[in-house]
Amino acid sequence: MSGSSAALQPPADAVKPVRHPDAPAPGELLGAHYEHCFGCGPGQPHGLHLEARAGEGVSLTAEFTVQPAHQGAPGLAHGGVLATALDETLGSLNWLLRTIAVTGRLETDFLRPVPVGTTLYLEAEVTAVAGRKIYCTATGRLGGPGGPLAVRADALFVEVKVDHFVDHGRQEEIQAVMNDPDQIRRTRAFEVNP
Ligand SMILES: CCCCCCCC(=O)SCCNC(=O)CCNC(=O)[C@H](O)C(C)(C)COP(=O)(O)OP(=O)(O)OC[C@H]1O[C@@H](n2cnc3c(N)ncnc32)[C@H](O)[C@@H]1OP(=O)(O)O
């Protein structure tokens, strides 16, 4: 079964998303937003090391290669890891809007098993925005853009202030980010508009 629930249907007053004028150009790699992010950070040895690239409008593509550390069943990717890849890809869209937002709801369809060693090719786009609510959708294909559809997701992200992280995050990590002399790295840790 597939298709998103009523909770992920944009309301009647939803509008089309607007790409931020300073969003990276189509084709540009977005880079990791935070070194220790499990989804994209280079500082996580068993992380996904997902690489996202800006697309046209408010869309992007991303890739990640399933490693032995990502197994659930023997030789197959864990479903939670695949959901993480979708979540990270969808979350990266907010950089194109220059909005700080967190996942409120993520609905995932697992359509085919994904073997270890496979590169999952992901495509995502924001479909609608209603106030603080950002509606988006993503697919993951085996091997490349024309590969078989393996996973898909619909999600709702909710815009938050940077206080969301400062108030709830462990002080150790928040302080380390705040003390980073690199302003871009500091702001991107929370995907904040610099
Ligand atoms: C920095 C980028 C990192 C990217 C990494 C990948 C993304 C992530 O994994 S983020 C981490 C996982 N997510 C989280 O930890 C979020 C935890 N949840 C929260 O903090 C809160 O519940 C939060 C912020 C989502 C919403 O709370 P709050 O700010 O009080 O807003 P709230 O008033 O409840 O909701 C706002 C609107 O969203 C809707 N909404 C909120 N949650 C949901 C949900 N689960 N399903 C449907 N609608 C929802 C509400 O109904 C409300 O709608 P309306 O405006 O029409 O009344």
Image (cartoon, helix red, strand yellow):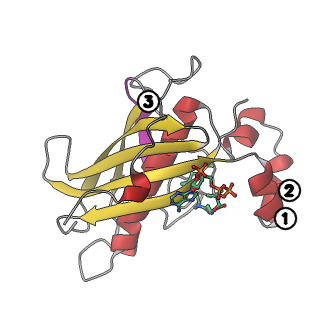
Q: Residue 169, how many percent across, how many down?
A: 76, 63
**Furthest-front residue in view?**
12
The numbered mark, 1 or 3, whose residue comes first in the sequence reads 3
Q: Residue at x 60, y 44 (%)?
A: 33
Task: Compare residues 165 and 35 and report the one nearer the observer.
Answer: 165
Q: Which residue is identified by label 3?
A: 58
Q: Report the span colored magenta.
A: 51-56
Q: Is residue 49 visible?
A: no
Q: Left of 121 or right of it: where is 147?
A: left
Question: Marks 1 and 2: CB-CB under 8 Å?
Answer: yes
Q: Is residue 72 above or below residue 190?
A: below
For the residues carrying marks 1 and 3, which lies nearer the camera in this image? 3
| Pick the front one: 109 or 32 | 109
Q: Position of residue 28 (x, y in %)?
A: 45, 26
Q: Check disc 2 and report the residue beneath it.
A: 175
Specify the farthest residue to the bottom: 74
Q: Amino acid at mark 3?
A: Val
Image point 51% across, 42% down: which residue? 134
Identify residue type, mark 2.
Gln
Mark 1 sits on what residue?
171
Helix, strand or loop at mark 3: loop
C-alpha separation, residue under disc 2 versus residue under disc 3: 32 Å
Q: Give the residue type at disc 1.
A: Gln
Q: Quadrant of ligand 1?
A: bottom right
Q: Decide if residue 76 is on the left or right side of residue 154.
A: left
Instruction: Classify residue 187 by image quadrant.
Output: top right
Query: What's the CA distance linking mark 1 and mark 2?
Result: 6 Å
State the quadrant of the N terminus: bottom left
Residue sitting farthest toward the top:
21
Badge 2 element: helix
Other residues around mark 2 within 10 Å, as few (<14) / some (14–19) / many (≥20): few
